[in-house]
Amino acid sequence: MKKKNKAREYLFVDGYNIINSWESLKEKSKISLEEARIELLEILSEYQHYSGIVIVVVFDAHQVKGNSGTEEDYKGLRVVYTKENETADNYIERVLDEIGRIKKVRVATSDWMEQQIVLSRGGIRISARELEVEIYNEKKMIKRKRKTINQKNDIQIGKLDEKTIRMLKDWFKTEG
């Protein structure tokens, strides 16, 4: 029996909007905007890894003279810096026009006007706060799963005889 091809979900994140909405990142950005960007990318990279959602983070670079726009990979995330005279909103809207009605696309922004445009173009809007809660809940779920797996492993190890346990401990000492 063939498995159904599960449609991939895409999440576009308005990077600076999220940085300015999440308290921890907002505070960090007052000291170093670069550090706040890196922390956001770290959080989203980990989230993408566990969730399986394809995440594209878009940062405004529209006020940078002569900027032709760049894309890079950051630990599996697609990171877009918009070109001169193109905002993150413009970029996201353009992509939504291309794929919004044929793929599941969510857009994370707390910009109310942008949320309305996203909805009208076939996307699903998610506020910065909703994204923060979603990531927090995903981390909690993963922590619970790890705890359960560790408990099962402890039970399995408890079933081993002393000789095997000693051999494993010795093996770990030589490997470490």
Image (cartoon, rainbow, N blue to C red):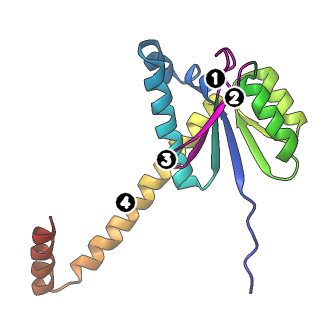
In the drawing, does residue 74 fall left or right of residue 90?
Answer: left
Specify the farthest residue to the front.
66
| Residue 3 on image: x %, y % | 72, 77
Along the viewing direction, whichever of 158 and 20 lies nearer the viewer:
20
Element under label 3?
Answer: loop
Q: Which residues are magenta?
A: 59-84
| Image point (81%, 52%), residue name | 103
Along the viewing direction, whichever of 165 and 71 lies nearer the viewer:
71
Give me the C-alpha separation between circle 1 and circle 4: 34 Å
Give me the C-alpha separation between circle 4 and circle 2: 33 Å
Q: Amino acid at mark 3?
A: Lys
Eye-nearest disc, 4 or 3: 3
Element under label 1?
Answer: helix
Element under label 4?
Answer: helix
**Which mark sits nearer the N-terminus, 1 or 2?**
1
Residue to which mark 2 is pinned: 109
Residue to which mark 1 is pinned: 17
| Residue 36 on image: x %, y % | 47, 25
Element under label 2?
Answer: loop
Give me the C-alpha separation between circle 3 and circle 1: 21 Å
